[in-house]
């Protein structure tokens, strides 16, 4: 065996150290491209994972997003924050929109409502800053109270909130030709939206229980089931969402024949109950013989079938 000189041994030691650092860098990759999952999984929303279509919503707080990694992780849609109030643009919106489109991820934009600005002003601001894109998902109006706001933390009267929402929804539909989606949380839904706007698709936040346990009879199209999700291509937490329907309904949603069109376009809408699957229940029939996941006839309702995707 050849004995190495001191200088050679030192050189090899330096090389070994460099390699170990490089390998350590490789093991750090999962921190940037984490395994798909949830940092704080809640057993109450476990059923969300069984739904076939999953997506995310993002804003500036997700930083630089590798949209190819996001797509390769099985992400089927993304909603991107565009605007807030009447004078704020999310600084990452254009970058995220272009990246998602280039990666082939179906994408839509959302506006965060600021209750101290007029509805007309906010609607104009939103439509000014979103692309005119016939392939985009329907626009989203994010309605929730914002008690942490430094300039507008107080709740407004229910009637005024509903008036503002209706004005903005009408303007978004006029501009895009698509029925807007309403995103909301449990508190705002209870305070303002319960029993209202039944002919709009809802995207609801429910991160500790299934939606029917928190939103009573509210039908919904999208379910935000965690805010601590992990998806390869995003460093840190990201909101994860599930489409409340089948693969076939998702295809219809994307091409406009099953969602997002104006209600007078003559297209059929799928129907099902928002109740959970129960033993010995009767599945609801959908067009083409489809049966949505966890969709059953109401047990004690006078109208045994509620709108499944009400758009």
Image (cartoon, rainbow, N blue to C red):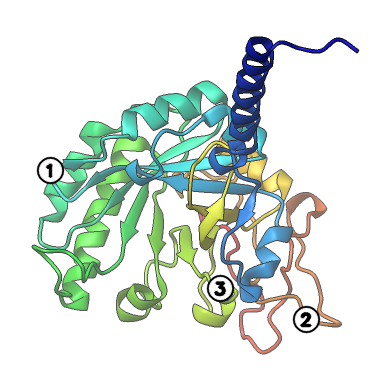
Report how far apart the C-alphas of labels 2 and 3 lie in the structure.
15 Å
Under tag 3, what secondary structure? helix
Q: Position of residue 12 (x, y in %)?
A: 68, 16
Instruction: State the residue at coordinates (62%, 49%).
Output: 54
Q: Position of residue 155 (x, y in %)?
A: 17, 75
Q: Can residue 64 be seen in this view?
A: yes
Residue under circle 1?
87
Under tag 2, what secondary structure? loop
Query: On the rendered structure, is 193 left or right of 70?
Result: left
Circle nearer the N terminus (2, 3)? 3
Q: Which residue lies furthest to the bottom in this view?
A: 300
Instruction: State the residue at coordinates (66%, 63%).
Output: 48
Q: Give the vertical position of 130 relative to 59 (above or below).
A: above
Q: Can residue 216 be seen in this view?
A: no
Numbered label attached to residue 211: 3
Q: How crowded is mark 2: few (under 14 residues within 10 Å), some or many (20 or more)?
A: some
Q: Give the vertical position of 272 relative to 75 (above or below).
A: below
Residue under circle 2?
278
Under tag 1, what secondary structure? loop
Instruction: State the residue at coordinates (53%, 64%).
Output: 220
Query: On the rendered structure, is 126 left or right of 212?
Result: left
Report how far apart the C-alphas of labels 1 and 3 lie in the structure.
33 Å
Q: Do the residues labelled 1 and 2 touch (CB within 8 Å)?
A: no
Q: Quadrant of residue 19?
A: top right
């Amino acid at each position: 065996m050849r004995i190495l000189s001191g200088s050679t041994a030192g050189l090899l030691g330096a090389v070994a150290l460099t390699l170990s650092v490089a390998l350590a860098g490789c093991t750090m990759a999962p921190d940037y491209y984490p395994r798909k999952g949830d940092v704080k999984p809640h057993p109450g929303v476990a059923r969300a994972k069984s739904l076939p279509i999953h997506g995310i919503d993002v804003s500036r707080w997700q930083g630089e997003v590798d949209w190819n990694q996001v797509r390769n992780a099985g992400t089927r849609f993304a909603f991107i924050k565009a605007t807030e109030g009447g004078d704020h643009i999310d600084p990452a919106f254009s970058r995220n929109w272009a990246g998602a489109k280039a990666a082939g991820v179906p994408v839509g934009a959302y506006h965060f409502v600021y209750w101290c600005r007029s509805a007309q002003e906010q609607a104009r601001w939103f439509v000014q800053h979103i692309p005119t894109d016939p392939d985009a998902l329907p626009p989203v109006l994010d309605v929730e109270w914002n008690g942490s706001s430094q300039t507008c933390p107080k709740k407004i009267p229910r009637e005024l909130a509903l008036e503002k929402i209706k004005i903005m929804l009408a303007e978004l539909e006029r501009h895009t030709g698509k029925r807007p989606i309403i995103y909301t949380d449990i508190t705002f839904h209870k305070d303002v939206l319960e029993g209202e706007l039944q002919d709009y698709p809802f995207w609801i936040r429910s991160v500790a229980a299934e939606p029917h346990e928190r939103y009573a009879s509210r039908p919904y199209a999208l379910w935000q089931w965690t805010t601590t999700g992990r998806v390869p291509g995003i460093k840190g937490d990201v909101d994860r969402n599930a489409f409340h329907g089948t693969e076939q309904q998702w295809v219809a949603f994307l091409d406009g024949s099953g969602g997002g069109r104006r209600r007078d376009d003559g297209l059929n809408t799928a129907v099902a109950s928002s109740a959970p699957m129960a033993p010995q229940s009767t599945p609801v029939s959908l067009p083409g013989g489809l049966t949505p996941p966890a969709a059953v006839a109401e047990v004690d309702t006078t109208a045994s079938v509620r709108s499944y995707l009400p758009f």
